[in-house]
Amino acid sequence: MAETDWHVVANAAECYSVWPAALPVPDGWRLAGPTAPKDECLEWIAANWTDPRPAGVGREVA
Amino acid sequence: MNTLIDLFTLSADAHADRTAVSDESGDKLTYRELDELSTRVALELRARGVGREDRVGIHLRRRVDLFVAVLAVLKAGGVYVVVDDRYPEARRGLMLETAGVRLTLTESTWWEQSPNPVVWDEIRSASPRDGELAAPVPSDAACVLFTSGSTGVPKGVVLEHGSVAAFAVNPSLPKLEPDDKVAQVANVSFDAVHFELWGALAAGAELAVMPSLADLVRTDLRRELRRRRITAMLAPTMAVNHITGEDADAFSGLRVLHTGGDVVRPAACRAILGAGFDGVMCNLYGPTEATTAVTCFDVSGLAPDAANVPIGSAIDGTWVLLLDDELRPVPVGAPGNLYIGGIGVARGYLRDPARTAERFLPDPSGPPGSTMYATGDRARDLGDGVLEYLGRSDEQVKVRGYRVEPPEVEKSLLAHEQVRDVAVVVVGSGQDCRLVAFVVAEGEGLAPQALREYAESTMPDYQVPSELLFVENIPANSHGKRDRDRLLALLGERDRSREEYVAPRTDSERYLTELWEMLLGIERISVTDDFLRLGGHSMLAFRVRRRIERDYAVKLPVQDLLENTVLADLAVLMDGQVLAG
C-alpha cells in the first residue's frame, strides 16, 4: 500500500502543521507547502519555518 | 478570558490580609505583601530590560520568594521558566540554556549554573522604582514548562496566560476556597505546580510550600499534612499507588485530593476513600501540552468491581477527540488516538517547529485556525464522554504477531490483590521482542510461579510477560514517570550475571530453587546461580536459614550459608546435614 500523503498547512498566524490529504482542510488553514509523506512534510517545515514568529508584535510561537 | 495577573489581582483585592504563601522556614506573605513586593521586583525587571514575552529563568530554592519571582516576571510581561532545585545542577543549567532566557533570577551560590544571572537578594532589596507596568493579555505566553522527552532531553512547552488561568478556575473541578491551604510539593518545573500555585492564588487560598511528597512519605505524610493543616493537594499517582492499608488515612484530613500522572490503582483509591476521607478525590488526566488537566473523574463514582479507574470526561473549555490513524473519528466504545482541543492547548514546543507541527495539528472541531494536540495516548469512550485510558500508542508492540499494549498487561497484573505496582517493558525488537514485568509485591508470600499462573489464567498467552521480576520499587525519573531506562539497565545487569540455566535435579535443589525464587523475587533460578549475585544479602540469608530449619529440621550455621552461595553447593550441604541429623 502506498504511504498516505499529507499536506503542509498554515493558519493566519503563520503557524505550520500537517494534515491528511484525504480529508478536507479544516477552517482557518490553507495549503502552504508540499503534499508528501508525513516525514517529508515535517522535514520541509523544519527547513522553512525557521522564524516561528506568528503575525503579531513580539509573539514568539515556540 | 483572564490572565494570571487578572486572577491574582482579584484575590489580592478581596483577601489582602490573608496569607498567600508560606514555607517551612516560617516565612510568609499576605496577598497585599505579595502584590506589593512582586510589583516592586517587576519594575526592577523592566528597568533591566525584561519586556513582553521575554523568558526569565527562576533558579531559586523552593521557598516563598520563588513565588514572588514568578509573579514579578508575569507583571513585567515576561515568561517564567522555573527550574526545580532538585534537578542535578548540570541539568538545571541545560534547561535554562535550552529556554534561551534573557536573564536568570538566582541564588548567589548558583550564579555559575545560571545564564545571565541576577542575584535574587539584590533585586529584591533594590530601592523602589517608579513606573507603569503594561498588563499582559490572555494570548501572551506565561510560562515554559518542561516535559521529559522520549530521548531524556527535556522539551520546553510554551503555555499562554489564558490556558493556565482557565485551568486554575475551571468550573468542572472542585472549587478551592479562601480557607483552603494547598500543599506545594510538586517539582516547580512540572505542570502539577499549576494546580498548587494558580489554584491557590486564584481562590485567595494559602500556598504552603512543603518538602517533596517522597520526603513526606519517608517521614510521616499524615502527620506533616496535619501539622501544616493542608486541605487540598495533588498527589502524583505513583505516590497514591503506594498507599496501603496502614497509611491510607494519610489524606483523610483533606477536602480536595487530586491524583494524576500515571494509571491509578482502583485498590489504592478504595483504600483512601475507605479510610475516613470525606472530601472529593479526582483522577486527573492531561499532558503538559494541554495545561495539566483535560479530563477529570470523581473517584467516589468508582464502581465497586471496577478493574480500572476511568480518566473521566473533558473539563470545561476543552474537548477530546478519539481518532484513527487517518484522523477520522472512531465509533463510541472503540479504542482511538486521543487528541485534545480547546483553551488548554499549548502554543507549541520552544524553538522546535517540526515537533510542534507534528504534535499540534489543525483542529477540525475548534475555532478556525486553532490547533489540537496529539497526545500519543489511546483511550475509549465508555459512553457519555467518560474515557478509559488505554496506554501509549507508541508503546504498542507485536508479540508473536499479536498487538500488545504494555499498560494493558500492567493493568491485568495490578488486578492481583498482592501486586502493589508493576511496570511492563518491552525487551528486544521485531520478532525477538518480549515482555518483562517488574513487580512490586504487597507484603510477602507472593511467589513468581503463583503470579505467573494467575497471569496465564487471566490474559491471552501473548500478553503474559516472558519474565516476572520482583523488585522493591519501580524507579521513577525526575518527572515522576517510570524510568524505563533504569528498568532495562536492571534487567541487563541481571542477565549478564546469569548466562546459563540448569534446572534443579534433586529434591533439595527443587526446594531451594522455590525458596530463592520467593525470597529474591526472581524467576527461573538456575542451580548454578549465586545467592549474592542475585541480590541476596545477609538478612535474606537469615531467612533462608530459618526456612530450612523449619522445613527440614536442620540448623545450618550462617557462616556455611555465606560460604556456599551457589544453589547446588548449598543443596549438597543441606543434604549432608539432613543425613547427619
Image (cartoon, rainbow, N blue to C red):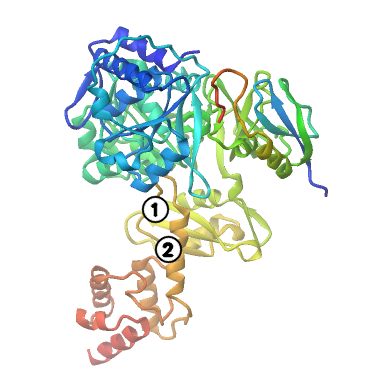
Q: Residue furthest right?
A: A1
Q: Is residue B373 left or right of residue B561?
A: right
Mark 1 and mark 2 in contact (Cβ < 8 Å)?
A: yes
Disc on the earlier residue, 2 or 1: 1
Q: Residue at x 50, y 51 (%)?
A: B410
Task: Report the quarter where the C terminus of chain B lies.
Answer: bottom left
Res B175 visible: no
- Three-letter amino acid code of the residue under disc 1: Pro
The answer to which of B190 and B534 lies nearer the viewer is B190
As drawn, is A18 to the left or to the right of B55? right
Image quarter for residue B330? top right
Q: Between residues B318 and B444, which one lies in front from this camera angle? A: B318
Res B374 quadrant in image: top right
Parent chain of label 1:
B
User: Which residue is labeled 2 in the image?
Assistant: B490
Q: Which mark is residue B433?
A: none
The residue that mark 1 highlights is: B475
Q: Is residue B240 visible?
A: yes
Image coordinates for residue B509, horizontal then vertical, percent: 38, 82
